[in-house]
Image (spheres, rainbow, N blue to C red):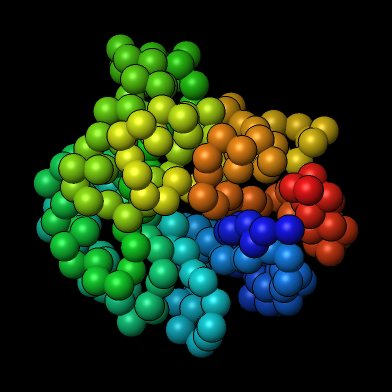
């Protein structure tokens, strides 16, 4: 079985829970990294813990969305944490994502496309006239032009993104077979996403809710 890249979403402020997640996601058949979102990154002990975390692949899911100078300053402010990946919204615009890429150094800068909690109907309410696929395609082109290292998109847009973006494609919106969608709109199973061309998956509650070891074993079975 090949090494499949999985980023586990560490969505908690409880350090003990985070340690438990990391401890139980050490199966040799899978390659795990750890995604820390705004909940953890903004917690009292989050930065301190990340500074002490060694020999793990870390993903700072800041989802930066601001003017170029602010995005650049934000990345510079967390360089001491030595993240392997950091996210920025492509909707921040070319100047912001390009400027941030220039200062990201060895940290891979990931461009976030349309969130997996949104669909065409939701985008129309916000004021967009284009559908999800058209917007994601435009964003992927912009990410390629800005020389970003990776893109985050839903598994339903992988094939579109692959046409114009030739680097890493990381997909959230992943659910094990039989699971409910929850707050996600555009989803696939892990196997489907990898077959579509994802280079890595982001998985949260599917793995971390309940018995982590059993959830991982189910994931391994589904990937065979």
**Residue 146, relative to residue 138: is it above or below?**
below
**Residue 36, relative to residue 138: is it above or below?**
below
- The residue lying at 83 percent from left, 50 percent from top is 221
- The residue lying at 33 percent from left, 82 percent from top is 80
Image position, residue 61 (x, y; %): 44, 57
- The residue lying at 53 percent from left, 28 percent from top is 156
Image position, residue 210 (x, y; %): 84, 56
- 189 lies left or right of 79: right
Q: Hey, which quadrant is residue 161 in on the image?
A: top left
Q: Residue furthest front?
A: 1
Report the label total. Answer: 0
- Which one is in front, 174 or 116? 174
- Which one is in front, 158 or 50? 158
Image position, residue 202 (x, y; %): 58, 51
**Residue 1, relative to residue 159: is it above or below?**
below
Q: Is residue 17 visible?
A: no
Q: Is residue 137 visible?
A: yes
- The residue lying at 19 percent from left, 47 percent from top is 146
Q: Hey, which quadrant is residue 191 in on the image?
A: top right
The quadrant of the picture occupied by the N terminus is bottom right
Image position, residue 25 (x, y; %): 72, 68
- 4 lies left or right of 224: left
**Residue 213, relative to residue 119: is it above or below?**
below
Q: Hey, which quadrant is residue 20 in on the image?
A: bottom right
- 26 lies left or right of 57: right
């Amino acid at each position: 079985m090949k090494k499949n890249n999985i980023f586990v979403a560490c969505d908690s402020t409880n350090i003990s829970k985070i340690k438990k997640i990391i401890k139980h996601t050490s199966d040799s058949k899978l390659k795990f990294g750890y995604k820390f979102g705004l909940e953890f990154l903004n917690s009292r002990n989050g930065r301190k813990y990340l500074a002490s975390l060694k020999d793990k692949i870390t993903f700072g899911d800041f989802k930066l969305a601001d003017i170029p100078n602010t995005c650049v300053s934000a990345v510079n402010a967390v360089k001491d944490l030595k993240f392997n990946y950091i996210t920025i919204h492509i909707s921040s615009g070319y100047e912001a994502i390009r400027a941030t890429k220039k200062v990201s150094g060895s940290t891979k800068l990931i461009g976030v496309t349309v969130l997996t909690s949104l669909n065409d109907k939701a985008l129309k309410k916000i004021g967009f006239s284009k559908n999800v696929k058209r917007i994601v395609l435009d964003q992927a082109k912009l990410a390629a032009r800005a020389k970003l290292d990776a893109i985050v998109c839903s598994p339903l847009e992988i094939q579109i993104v692959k046409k114009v973006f030739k680097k890493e494609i990381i997909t959230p919106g992943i659910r094990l077979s039989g699971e409910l969608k929850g707050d996600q709109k555009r989803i696939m199973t892990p196997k489907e996403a990898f077959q579509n061309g994802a280079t890595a998956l982001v998985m949260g509650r599917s793995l971390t809710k309940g018995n982590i070891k059993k959830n991982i074993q189910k994931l391994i079975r589904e990937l065979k």
